[in-house]
Image: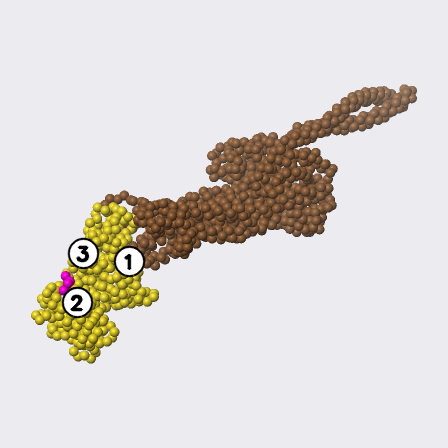
Amino acid sequence: MASTKKNSKAVWMIMEELLEVDNIDEALDGFISTLVKTLKSEAGAIWILNKKTDLLHCMFNVGPLDLTDMIIENGRGLEGRVTQSASKVFAPHVEGDSDYELSCFDERGFTVTSAICVPLTTPNDVFGCIMVANRQDGDLYSREDVTLCNQMASLVAATIEEKGLVPEDTGDKEVIVSVNNLTKEYAGGSNIKGALRGINLDIYKNELLVILGESGCGKGTLFNLIGGLDEPSKGSVMVEGRELSALSDHELSKYRRKYLGFVFSEHNLMPNLTALENIRFAAELVDYPLMPEEALSMVKLSELADNYPEQMTIEEGQRVSIARAIVKKPRLILADEPTAGLDCKSGTELLEIIEKVVRSQGATVMMITHNSEIAKMADRVVKLRSGRIKSIRRNIHPIAAKELEW
Amino acid sequence: MKVTQRKDSFRLIGEQKISWISIMIIVALSVMAYLGLNFASRSLEDSGNSFYRESRFRDLEISSTMLLTEEDIDRIRQCEGVKEVEGICKSEGFLSKRVGGADKREVEILSLTDNINKNTVKEGRLPEKEDECAMEEEIAGELGIKVGDEVSLASLEGEAPKYLKGKDYRVSALVTTAEHASTRDGSLPALIVKREAFDPESLGPYFMEALVLMEKPENISYFDRQYLEEVNKVTESLESLARERERLRTNEVKGSYQSKIGESEALLSTGGDQLLEAKKKLDQDRKELAESEKSLDKMKADLDAILKQYPEGSSIFEAIRPRYEESLSLYNKSLKEQEEKQAKYESSKKDYDEKLKEYYRGKTNLEDSKKELSEIGSCRWLLLGPKGNPSYAYTYSSVNNIRELGTAFAIIFILLGALVTIVTTGRMVSEQRKALGLLKTLGLYKREMLLKYVTFSLSATLSGILLGFFGGTYFLQRLLLKIYGSFFIYDTSGLKIDPLLTVLVVTGEILLSFLTVFFSCFGLLKKKAEKLMEDRLPSYRHKRKGGEQGSSLYFKLIFYNIMSALKKTLITIISIGGVTAVLVAGFTMKGSVSKTLKYHYKDIIAYDYQLDHQMADDKTLFEKIQEIAGKDSIKCDGFYDKERYINVKGEMIKAELICGSLTKLDSYILRIDHKSGKEISGDIDPSGEYCEGIWIYSRLAESKGLNKGDEFLLYDDQLNPYAVKVAGVFENYFGSRLIMSDDYYKKVFGQAPRNNTIFIKSGLELEGEKLMALLGLDGVSQVKSEGKSYDFGKRSIDIFGNIALVMVAVAAVMSYLILQNLINIHMGQKKRELTLMAINGFYTKELKLYGSGEFLVNSALGMLLGLFLGSFLGRYMIGLMESESMEFVKNIRPEAWFFSVLIIFIFILLALLVGMKDIKKLDLKSLTGE
């Protein structure tokens, strides 16, 4: 009786969200999170069908895995079968259930023990499917849970039908950094702020990835581990087939030197060098850098070339900092709260530069922030909570930085 | 101070413990050096004072060229400022054991005093009989003499020493004498006998010296300038008495000569008259003799003619026979009378000749006496203050040298400590700049903010003072006293603590600590809060054009960093310069000591032995020396060598005068021109110019400002002054040698010098037996080995080398601490930049080079500065060690530079090694938000 009441409350909540929200990406992200939370599940995902290509795209996922890069053929695997057949699969006890076919979770190494996969259907069409796996308390899903999933799937399908949602065909994206089961423990246990507990994430070439989370959720730790600034307790960060923790100090320096660009919450410029010299200082580290003047021009600070860091505003300093990062033409720019301390206007101006770097220069940026508004401009948004990935979503239609407000 | 502020201050100490410990140790070392050296100096002064007070050391010593009379002594006693006077008799002789000891030593024989220059009995009792003596422990030890032994005192000729009654004595005591407080004063050992041992017949009622005790404040230090001034006052008051007594004594002695000459002249005159009479009578007698001889001859001729004309037996003869025989008898009688007269005449002639000889002898003696009278000159008194005593002079210079060295070193150490405090506090304040701005915003007063840094610095300083006080008092002082103790006959082990000096040091250090904190913080604290919270603009902004390309910024940045932190750069350079300078100075001192010894004894002094003699002709000695030495190739030449007084600009100085053929002397004593460093040959200076005059030792020229062509007074043995002209200055490091040619000596003194010494160049060490054989040659008084002189010189100046080593050790410890502290500070300041660079992919070696580059550049500049300053400092320190008869080589010592740079370089590498460890531990996460 109590669960029925809870389920109803969740349905109403989702309904309100779906009706009110302008941004369907955000609404669906909220939906899957609510569903996984209501059903106390370990993981969940929404798969959307591109009818033109007949491919299923994982648009949102919650849990330890990053499935957002996955695209499967319609009809293939559990999710494909459910979408193609428009009929649900309820496998309260997967082991020995002949009806259960391996899902994408299983493919990625997540052992599914109990699962519900329901199609997103309206009377007129099928849009994809929703899957939830494994209750956190170890119980099995019930029929009541299936009902809830069905109800919610109907709502989502109706919304998609109304708002329209067609996943883009992104083709095969190149993974430049792959994070697998990344764990960082600090003395005092895994509950210490900043600890990471089994993060799986891929970073694709030419994407703007935003890591979102409250203070102490572990986003900085993730930044440090990907940046080769810290060593994981478990798991790995793979870059071009090599594990970072296996690299020597020299190789790690080389990785940072050739592969990465950094932008910090404070500009951290060399105090005795001018703006242009700070950029040149970084440019000298690589074989084929941008012209320092060009990098400075990209951040619109050519007129301040001879200014020292202390003669610049915080925003100007950050711009130089971005120019310093891009001058090396790195494969990945890691930005740590670059807008911290800036007002909305200055912040958005700075984000416009980052946006431009990604959209026009083909750079890849992983930006960590606690500002959820910034997430709207990202290609993908990873939400962290307590050292785990709470959700990963793909923004089908990221908004322009200049439209952000906070 | 409020509780929270106190906590904050203590936490600061905990956070900055390396800097705190550095300041503490640096302060400790400087306090230790200052107090240790000063306390040691004062302890030496105290023990010296005790010794001189207990022995009632004479303040003045008066001697006269014509001895001193009882009346002289009485008149001195009545002089203003004089408290007590005692006359003493002196002689010199050779001491040997009467039985079982062939070895002999020249000693100074002194009459026993009652109340001045009292002897301290170490064993036995003071002499009570004429044939008893007491001697110094050291000489007794050397000759194996014990109390109760029979000893012999003799002159070179084997007679009793001049003025002494006898040769044989029994040793009644072993003593220490006030004359010889130091075992290193180079003077003759003393032997004490009763006044009655001196022979009144030969000496008369005279004394050789008067010892004077003056009225002076009871607790005045013998090593205080005030004491010497008091002595000078009494000396001045005695000067007029001296002139008066000199005149009187001169008149007395000359009068005595005059009256003797008068008497002799009268006697000669009477004798002359008598001789004249005798001569007349002799002449008469001779005339008469001649006449009677003539008459006899005639008689004989007549008789012979008679016989010829009338042969015997003829009738005529027979007729005149009676007449003939009568005439013959008369002739024979007359002949006999003639012979008697002749004998008488001969006797009178002999007497006359004797008296004539006597007369001429008397006349010669009279001429000689007249000549002596004309040459006797005037009586002169010599008034010697305490510095005339070699032991006192040595103690005085030791006390002052240590004190001045201590002060000089300590000042540098303290300055370095202050610099380190400024750097450390400045860095802390700079690091906490924004926090200070915040505190200011919160309303804290400047003094409240300052208090934290004052607490930091003051606590380190006070701890350092405490440590330094104990180290200085109980370690360094003890060490120095142990080193110096062996040079004195009295106990120097008593540790001294001077409360006033300690309080001054504590106050000074506290004040300095406060001032350094104030200096490093106050400028910043004066700034407005918002300014403090802003980042600082680099002070050095290089000019560049926007598109300028050039060499790598990586290296340029090192230069920019140096220029941007000029104050820090300067302090770093000065600090490293300071420690390098101290090391250079220490090594220069040490090197100078070794070099001086080697240079003087191996290069300048070319002879191996010096044989003193009293032979009028030394040619026979040369043969004997060659015979004994057993070497045909042995080279030896005779010279005149004697101690003489000189008066330069009013100051009486004792110096060694060597005269002879300068061309020959060049083979034994090398004269290097002090200015050009080139060799002087004979009377020809390095520029080829002939120089007539006296060649003087460099220390005299330096200390008295004498130059070529200047004049000063040189005294003869009777203390008659003669003006001499400086021919040139030659390098001489030990002793006080003056050199002049025979010709110039003759020109100055009117007579040629009589050789009394032989320089021997053997090239081999003569064995004991041969040395004894040389010593046993007739007229030889002593044989001095230059090897022994070298050992003696080495022992005397090694102490300076040891002090230099102690200072080098202290400076080295300090250097390392300062360098480590500077590097830690530097690395602390560069940490953020290095982290940023590491994040951006700079390799570890690049980070290390960047981290160390700036410091290495500053270090190199600091070392250059240190080499420059250190050479001057070393020269200054060496100047402090020098005394009137001891000079050190003051050239720049390349090995001092080398070792100093090597040590600093090794320390920099060590300190960098420690400091650079942090580069590997850089927390790269520190710049990210998590």
- What residue is drawn where x is 25% and y is 65%? A385
Residue A196 against residue A306 in the figure, above or below: below
Q: Which mark is residue B861?
A: none
Query: Is B680 colored magenta in this rendering?
Result: no
Looking at the rendered structure, the kind of residue marked 3 is Leu
A399 vs B864, left or right, is: left
**Can residue B493 be seen here?**
yes
Of B320 and B336, which appears nearest the observer?
Answer: B336
Tell me the quarter of the picture where residue B837 sits: bottom left
According to the rendering, which colour does chain A have? yellow
Looking at numbered disc 1 in the image, what kind of residue is underneath it?
Thr
Q: Is residue B860 visible?
A: no
**Can you identify the residue that label 1 sits on?**
B928
Q: Amino acid at mark 2?
A: Ile
Q: Which labelled disc corresponds to residue A14?
A: 2
- Residue B773 at what x, y percent from top left? 64, 47
Q: Main secondary structure of the magenta part?
A: helix
How crowded pointer 1 is (Cα within 10 Å; few <14, some 14-19, many 20+) is rated as some
Look at the image and give the colour of chain B. Answer: brown
- Secondary structure under badge 3? loop
Q: Which residues are magenta?
A: A12-22
What secondary structure is marked by label 2? helix
**Quarter occupied by the C terminus of chain B:** bottom left
The residue that disc 3 covers is: A404
Query: Mark 3 vs mark 2: same chain?
Result: yes
User: Mark 3–mark 1 contact, CB under 8 Å?
Assistant: no
Q: How is the image coloured?
A: by chain
Residues B784 and B234: in front is B234
Q: Chain of mark 2?
A: A
Q: Specify few, some or many for label 3: CA neighbours under 10 Å numbering under 14, 14-19, or 20 or more.
A: some
